[in-house]
Amino acid sequence: MSDTHPDTHPDTRHGRAGWVALVGGGPGRPDLITVRGLELLRRADVVVVDRLAPRALLDDLRPEVEIVDAGKEPHGHNLTQEEINRLVVDRAGRGLGVVRLKGGDPFVFGRGGEEALACAEARVPWEVVPGVTSAVAVPALAGIPVTHRGITQDVTVVSGHVDPSHPGSTVDWDAVATGAGTVVVLMGVGALARIAAEMIKRGRARSTPTAVIHSRNGGDQQVVTGPLADIASLASDAGIESPSVIVIGDVVALRDKLT
């Protein structure tokens, strides 16, 4: 974290130095953002917002706040990451308070580390505000604890953005498949059939309970469950789309008792 904290400059509109806060908005529901995140959002002069951030919170901002939509749709970007980095550094350099509002947690597949490095290199005061990652929150809201005593003591969170068979994938799918713990896959709906096939090919039982949870705002959910071998076709038949979270493991069976 930067040596200069946003608290050092409580009012950027009176000639004080600017700052950047990388705020995790949680799984989409506006009431699941942290107290610290909400505080900084209310103090911001500029808000750079992601597609999956709790956008309902923008309705309560001061009318003079600049809102920049940096939402990334699948297979299409409104702003490149480099453009976002330059934007937040530029606005802070003008003496403004900037909140980079993200869904989930900034440092869990949120590219918050890249933005923090850009601020550090530019010597811009910055802060990270952790958020509740969708890897845990979305299953929890669907009645699936990712760990449970007597079932599993570990959970692995992986990105499904890159096809498991692609040489560019850095995920150790052999270890993921042969482990006994829960596997949570983010950004993997488009590759669900290939992920399931690779998991089975590398040792995970075909009958492993699996859930696909579609959630856009952290509250309204569409949940499909079934064995790993069938989950891709079940999700397709149900019309499950992105954004969704995939949960693979015996904890999925607890949903029947918890919902």
Image (spheres, rainbow, N blue to C red):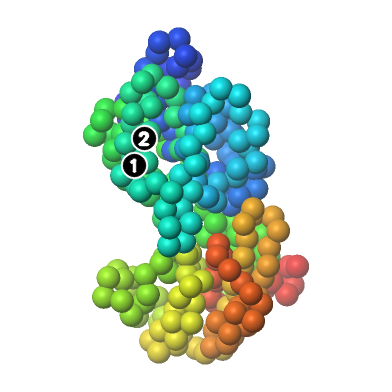
Q: Are marks 2 and 1 in contact (CB under 8 Å)?
A: yes
Q: Is residue 204 above or below residue 25?
A: below
Q: Residue at x 61, y 78 (%)?
A: 235
Q: Is residue 128 above or below residue 188?
A: above
Q: Residue at x 61, y 35 (%)?
A: 58
Q: Residue at x 40, y 13 (%)?
A: 16
Q: Which mark is residue 83?
A: 1
The quarter holding residue 163 reads: bottom left
Say whether residue 207 is left or right of residue 118: right
Position of the C terminus by quadrant: bottom right
Q: Nearer the viewer, residue 147 or 3?
A: 3
The quarter holding residue 246 reads: bottom right
Q: Nearer the viewer, residue 31 or 3?
A: 31
Q: Position of residue 143 (x, y in %)?
A: 68, 65
The quarter holding residue 174 reads: bottom left
Q: Is residue 123 above or below residue 244?
A: above
Residue position for label 2: 87
Q: Position of residue 185 (x, y in %)?
A: 48, 68
Say whether residue 164 is left or right of residue 153: left
Say whether residue 187 is left or right of residue 144: left
Q: Which mark is residue 252?
A: none
